RNA sequence: GCCGAUGUAACUCAGUUGGUAGAGUAGCGGUUUUGUAAACCGCCUGUCGGGGGUUCGAGUCCCUUCAUCGGCUCCA
């Protein structure tokens, strides 16, 4: 007798050992048709793996991420089988499922693969899938596993096997392909109906740049052709929201090969947009007791030797600038913290002065690797909305909460609901990597965790992701095509106060070391604007958007009145353009719609006579007539709704 | 930095097996004076990313370099 507990708490009894597939079948035929894998107790299993004792079972279909994962993992095997048949001698690394699809890292040896081969592989995969190959799990001994891959000459698999415990090794066989794999897998390949191999890329073996580079093929599969088509359409749609495309269309920023790669140039509309974001944050920071400071774009090399950054990053930075004085060297500043430490240090500080909060929109320069540059999200010169808080250890948590509040305020105002808050802590197995006392680290880590809990935040904890100088809390947001970028960051630092010998005098007249918090709610202006553009698909909130309205005279006869409307709105601080081309109104509307200008103000004979404008909302249509004052007031009230 | 791909007018793109570049949009000029998503006619635009080579001849082939794109690594 085997008792199976289902997620709803119900218990089913079976006379003999059963598989999850049997369980599914006993519930309904439809479920049996759709089920892909199952969680048996705490492990995800193949559907036909036999359950011999009482267990809890959760069945996964295409609607579960676990079900998709199994589907894609098996698809990776299918691709490997197809490739092994088409390119005999290929050696295989690892081939996992990922968030959207799967990949396999392979060493093609003397063969080289181009994108033209992908279609051939896709066809082969579908051909193999249609033969309904079973994926058969087999437990093997380590010796047997080693023998198999030694014979095959696959050093990558051998390396993986050597790290595994004997008795925990399994193979999966499907058709002609045998792979070292923990599983789970689909029972067979018949459900894989649509295949798209998306790209070829290089990837270092085991993520180590000193080891060989393998060829990685990314792909995705679906149980229905239609779902694949929908997915591809979605990808195309996402590309339209790419900030690099929008930034060009909306004239926010540009790059110039002559200025240099990774050095963004902010165009007038972009500069004004950035200015508005800065004012928005400055205002909030003032409420929270921040003081603005301004520091130079360069600093003496000695400054960065004191901070330790020169030793750690000097080689990979823009190289020091020489002066006419022999031996004197300056660096473009790669961060603002050392400068701010000097501000702290320039006079004695009392415990009563703390916390001190120095803020600066500080432009920094980092020589990012050439292959890393990416639109506005990864650049070589960028402006951090930086601030450094210096506080007493007992003030740390409160200050941390204050920063969280600012970040959450910004995210809420700008509609970033879909973010991940990631807490990065030490790697407990590698404690010597970190600077600062164990006691301080523990204090800081628990301060972060408690602060996020008090704010009721959902967080993800990443062990070993902390910076060497302190734990941190990062806010990650996805871009149009799902890549994750770090925006806001809050980091505790025990290192710099030490290196700069920062002190304050306590109430007992003793000297103490302040704690430092680095924080940047936007992260950088560049990256923030990039993500903002992608999230809004270029339809920025009214308070931020470069052009809020455009006046469209019906014909040249009304140009004078149109100019008057623009002037009046300008006085009411509505950002307004004029389209006085000799074009028909339909054309002017079309162009304004395509430029995503939120309000179109059409003026002709009627409007001029009555001192009104006909308002049309972008993407929505005619809103009727208003007086100019009414419209200005309307804009003001709309903006008030957006920021409060 | 590494693997792979791409680079043609301001923008989006076409350019056959090598025979000294083309479309649409934008821009400019003219006609039209327009009522809620594209009026008509005409004109202009290029070191075919840069450099080198092969060839009688290169946008097309080869080498090199720069930039961009997709990943990897990195990210103070």
Image (cartoon, rainbow, N blue to C red):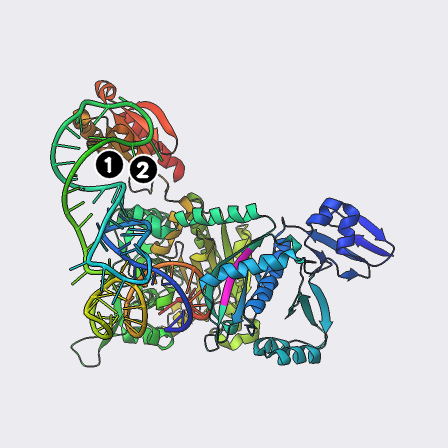
Asked which secondary structure carries label 2, the reply is loop
User: How many labels, in total?
Assistant: 2
Asked which secondary structure carries label 1, the reply is strand
Residue A289 point in image, percent of width and height: 37, 52
Q: Chain of mark 2?
A: A
Q: Main secondary structure of the magenta part?
A: strand
Magenta residues span A216-220
Q: Nearer the viewer, residue A616 or A555?
A: A555
Q: Nearer the viewer, residue A516 or A200?
A: A200
The answer to the question of whether label 2 and label 1 lie on touching residues, with beta carbons closer than 8 A, is yes
Is A499 rendered above or below residue A51?
below
Pointer 1 local density, CA inside 10 Å: few below 14, some 14–19, many at least 20: many
Is A457 rendered above or below residue A571?
below
Residue under label 2: A597
Residue A294 point in image, percent of width and height: 27, 59
Residue under label 1: A577
- Nearer-N-terminus badge (2/1): 1
Q: Chain of mark 1?
A: A
The answer to whether residue A166 is left or right of residue A418 is right
Pointer 2 local density, CA inside 10 Å: few below 14, some 14–19, many at least 20: many
The answer to whether residue A339 is left or right of residue A412 is left
């Amino acid at each position: 007798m085997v008792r199976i507990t289902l997620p709803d708490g119900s218990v089913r009894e079976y006379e003999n050992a059963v598989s999850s597939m049997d369980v599914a079948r006993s519930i309904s035929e439809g479920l049996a048709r759709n089920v892909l894998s199952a969680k048996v107790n705490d492990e995800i299993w193949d559907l036909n793996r036999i359950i011999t004792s009482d267990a809890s079972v959760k069945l996964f279909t295409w609607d579960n991420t676990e079900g998709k994962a199994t589907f894609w993992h098996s698809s990776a095997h299918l691709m490997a089988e197809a490739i092994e048949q088409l390119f005999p001698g290929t050696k295989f690394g690892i081939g996992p499922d990922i968030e959207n699809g799967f990949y396999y890292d392979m060493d093609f040896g003397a063969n080289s693969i181009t994108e033209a081969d992908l279609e051939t592989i896709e066809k082969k995969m579908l051909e193999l899938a249609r033969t309904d190959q079973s994926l058969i799990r087999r437990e093997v001994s380590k010796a047997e596993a080693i023998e198999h891959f030694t014979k095959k000459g696959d050093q990558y698999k051998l390396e993986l096997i050597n790290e595994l415990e004997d008795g925990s090794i399994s193979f999966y066989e499907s058709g002609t392909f045998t792979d070292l794999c923990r599983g789970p897998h689909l029972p067979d390949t018949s459900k894989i109906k649509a295949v798209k191999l998306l790209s070829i890329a290089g990837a270092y073996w085991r993520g180590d740049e000193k080891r060989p580079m393998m060829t990685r093929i990314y792909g995705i599969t679906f149980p229905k052709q239609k779902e694949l088509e929908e997915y591809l359409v979605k990808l195309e749609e996402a590309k339209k929201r790419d900030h690099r495309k929008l930034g060009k269309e909306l004239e926010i920023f540009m790059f110039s090969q002559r200025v240099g790669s990774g050095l963004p140039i902010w165009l007038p509309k972009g500069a004004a947009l950035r200015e508005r974001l800065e004012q928005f944050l400055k205002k909030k920071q003032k409420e929270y007791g921040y003081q603005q400071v301004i520091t130079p774009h360069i600093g003496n090399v000695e400054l960065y030797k004191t901070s330790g950054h020169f030793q750690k990053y000097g080689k990979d930075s823009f190289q020091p600038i020489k002066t006419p004085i022999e031996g004197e060297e300056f660096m473009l500043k790669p961060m603002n913290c050392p400068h701010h430490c000097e501000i702290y240090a320039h006079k004695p500080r009392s415990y009563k002065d703390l916390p001190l909060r120095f803020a600066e929109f500080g432009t920094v320069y980092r020589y990012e690797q050439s292959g890393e540059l990416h639109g506005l999200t990864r650049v070589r010169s960028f402006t951090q909305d930086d601030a450094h808080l210096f506080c007493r250890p007992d003030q740390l948590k409160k200050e941390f909460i204050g920063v969280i509040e600012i970040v959450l305020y910004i995210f809420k105002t700008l509609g970033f609901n879909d973010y991940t808050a990631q807490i990065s802590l030490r790697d407990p197995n590698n404690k010597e990597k970190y600077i600062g006392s164990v006691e301080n680290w523990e204090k800081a880590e628990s301060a972060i965790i408690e602060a996020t809990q008090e704010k009721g935040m959902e967080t993800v904890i990443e062990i070993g992701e902390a910076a060497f100088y302190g734990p941190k809390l990062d806010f990650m947001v996805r871009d149009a095509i799902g890549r994750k970028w770090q925006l806001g960051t809050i980091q505790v630092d025990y290192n710099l106060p030490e290196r700069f010998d920062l002190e304050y005098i306590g109430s007992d007249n003793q000297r103490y070391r302040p704690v430092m918090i680095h924080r940047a709610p936007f992260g950088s202006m560049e990256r923030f604007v990039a993500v903002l553009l992608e999230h809004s698909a270029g339809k920025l909130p009214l308070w931020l958007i470069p052009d809020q309205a455009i006046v469209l005279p019906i014909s040249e006869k009304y140009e004078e009145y149109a100019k008057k409307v623009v002037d009046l709105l300008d006085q009411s601080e509505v950002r307004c353009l004029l389209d006085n081309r000799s074009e028909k109104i339909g054309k002017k509307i079309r162009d304004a719609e395509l430029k995503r200008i939120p309000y179109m103000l059409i003026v002709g004979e009627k409007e001029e006579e009555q001192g009104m404008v006909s308002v049309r909302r972008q993407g929505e249509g005619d809103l009727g007539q208003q007086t100019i004052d009414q419209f200005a007031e309307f804009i003001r009230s709309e903006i008030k709704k957006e920021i409060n």
